[in-house]
Amino acid sequence: MPAPSTAPNLMATIVSLCKRRGFIFQASEIYGGMGNTYDYGPLGVELKRRVKEAWWRANVTTRADVVGLDSAILQHPKTWETSGHVAGFTDPLVDCKTCKARFRADKLGEAQCPQKPSRTPLENKCELTAPRAFNLMFKTHVGASEDSASVAYLRPETAQGIFLNFKNVLEASRLKPPFGIAQIGKSFRNEITPGNFVFRMREFEQAEMEFFVPPAQNDEWYAYWRARRLQWYLDLGIRRDKLRVREHEKDELAHYSTATCDVEYEYPFGWGELEGIACRTDFDLKRHSEASGVRLEFFDPDTKEHYTPFVIEPAGGIDRMALTFLIDAYAEEMVENEPRVVLRLHPKIAPITVAVFPLVKKDGMPEKAHELEQELREAGFSTFYDEKAAIGRRYRRQDEVGTPWCVTIDGDTLKDGTVTVRARDSMKQDKVAARDLVAYVTQALRSWKQG
Amino acid sequence: MPAPSTAPNLMATIVSLCKRRGFIFQASEIYGGMGNTYDYGPLGVELKRRVKEAWWRANVTTRADVVGLDSAILQHPKTWETSGHVAGFTDPLVDCKTCKARFRADKLGEAQCPQKPSRTPLENKCELTAPRAFNLMFKTHVGASEDSASVAYLRPETAQGIFLNFKNVLEASRLKPPFGIAQIGKSFRNEITPGNFVFRMREFEQAEMEFFVPPAQNDEWYAYWRARRLQWYLDLGIRRDKLRVREHEKDELAHYSTATCDVEYEYPFGWGELEGIACRTDFDLKRHSEASGVRLEFFDPDTKEHYTPFVIEPAGGIDRMALTFLIDAYAEEMVENEPRVVLRLHPKIAPITVAVFPLVKKDGMPEKAHELEQELREAGFSTFYDEKAAIGRRYRRQDEVGTPWCVTIDGDTLKDGTVTVRARDSMKQDKVAARDLVAYVTQALRSWKQG
């Protein structure tokens, strides 16, 4: 029996599983790898799609008071001057005058000399420059010239794209506060010390919402979103004792924020931020109003007054969510004296929903299995067909990637039209009429309770 | 009656509709706009989500022979050296020594002097430099230094991310040719002459598939994908006479390509490429094999031979698809002597699936309407509630954004539990039991035929 994976082994186990089964690969691996950059493989892209879909469904589709947006990565540079990112979105760096290496000034204790054998700490004889602010935004140039007029930045957050469109959305959608604008998209931060697999990457995908409220309703909506976002993770099966909400201390708050909290998860490397919920007040809308000369306010027809709404911002990273679901779902256990690795993913986010197996490769079973496979695919279910190896081994392969249901076509299928549906977690088997299979899976998905 | 919109008016009409109703906004509009960059508003983001979902469903979910991928935008620079983009992905540019402006050498005939009143063509006295190659990739720097070792490019196409992962995907998914790897994601090209709204942008979203086949099957799969991709547009309602497939002439082909065609649409500004289907042979896999030293081949267990598959690549732009669906769906007509604007979008891609109206704002109708609205939302349908203005005007507002069904709660609803479902195209009205509404819409969506 393999030892139950515990920190820090668990991270290595997850990284290895992710590569082997096609969840996540090192980017540009054939060229030695692109540091801190990852590609999602066939199973990873399906997991990520479902996490995004679940987020969108909970925060947009099922809500009358939230609409979506998809703003560009490249925005006018004035955006980032106004938001404060050009001046303030920095890490303090020092250079070594001897070996020319660069280090984070606030992490010199962990720094290692890159010209010495690995693990050699920075030496006292190294002569370091004074710390300088290094901006974390990726810079590029738009158009044919590379002068200062053509500078553009890859957005470091999706939020500003929402503030820029506040007026356009208000006019087009006829919403009134309290209402939200939600967005999922890539952001980029030129982190000096990224790490922990897809937990902190330079290129990452965010899911953010700016929820605009009358200032007097700020506190109640902050409490609402804090509870709501925590509940979303619980609804998708994350264990309660691995989650906590940590309110920021006064000295941690951005100067404009009245309150901020993090939903934290206990990763193998310690407690870490999974999502932040921030009270941003009217800071962003007012700044952009002043800088652009365009009034970003709401006119209340009842009171006949203009006001700038306050903002509650729930903001998380899709990559980090996907990683968290993987880590939390991972389990090793003994089944009939054999080890079993199982990802207990909620079926709504499992990359494969149904696997279809012919018991043996003859007697028309593969044909019938392919027929059912295609029926499930047409019904929209992510489906996987497997006819290789013993049935037990095929179950294990699906357990390891979190497939909630495996369907076996056997002798009975050809006689009485029934198939065997085996559940991932309980390993119990159900006899189901093949013609009812789509309805069975639809119903099982809908009524799922983690247990 | 408004004149039927014809080119070139139609483009202006679409752009205006897009802004007014919240499909597409100029990016950074409050700062004077970011040139050639657009943000998708509440309706646009839903349209785009559905176009992507329809593409993924047709090309991945319903197919046993295609898997998905989501590779990073920033890859190792060797990727773009090997693919030929560093050396060859260029436009020829000339500078004017007098006014310092820069022009495309191959479009000097259309060039206008930026220092003269608008529409003044380039003058003979302008002294131009010889053409120089200008690379269309956006360049940035990763990490803390800005030297040549830290250069990275924003990917100009998603395709290379698929070739880089060929081996990883093959090993993780146990597929064998013919099989495909599909991907949707952002790409970036520093175009000197972008234009026509979201038709050609610097930042855009691609949907690409590399379909790997045994070389002997190249021609049949090329024919297959050419027909299949054309059919996809027809299935989603694009008019047949607005589409054509144009085979590239020999002198248009990339040197490694044996055949390429474009699915073209007749835009208001002329016939333009909607999607390309290219035979890329074994060019990319072989180049990356040579440059990386990693064998990117398939071992055929039947013949015991290694070979490099040939590639068929259907590649389209999601923004361009969305624009095409909007343009093709747009119609103006007279209904009972009143003009009506209607977007005849296929219900699978319409941003709002159902609108819900209380006939009047009293007698419990708004409450009942909100109840049905929420039921539809929970069932996953994009839903819009409207209680403002006369019912006819509310219909028109939904017609203009392509909502296929409007549901009215009226006196009958409170008496016998029925609601009125009005269809966008035929404008016919159906009486439906409120409790059957979700099933009714589900069925109507499933059995939709454009007519």
Image: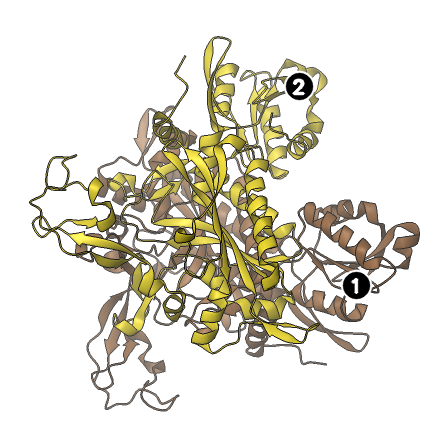
Chain colours: A brown, B yellow
Secondary structure under the numbered disc 2 in the rendered image: strand
Q: Quadrant of the C terminus of chain B?
A: top right
Same chain shared by disc 1 and disc 2:
no
Residue nearest the viewer, comparing A113 with B68: B68
* Amino acid on which the number 1 mark rests in the picture: Met
What residue appears at the point 51 percent right and 21 percent down from the top-left corner? B387
Q: Which residue is mark 1?
A: A427
Looking at the image, residue A277 sits to the left or right of residue A391; the answer is: left
* Amino acid on which the number 2 mark rests in the picture: Asp
Q: Which residue is mark 2?
A: B430
Task: Determine the chain carrying the residue at label 1.
Answer: A
What residue appears at the point 39 percent right and 15 percent down from the top-left corner? B2
- Where, by quadrant of the figure, is residue A24 drawn? bottom right
Residue lying at the far front in this picture: please name it. B250
Distance from Cα at disc 1 to Cα at disc 2: 47 Å
- Where, by quadrant of the figure, is residue B235 drawn? top right
Residue nearest the viewer, comparing A447 with B103: B103
Residue lying at the far right in this picture: please name it. A415
Rendering coords of residue B176 (x, y %): 64, 65
Rendering coords of residue B97 (x, y %): 9, 52
Q: Quadrant of the N terminus of chain B?
A: top left
Label 2 Cα neighbours within 10 Å, binned few <14 / some 14-19 / many ≥20: few
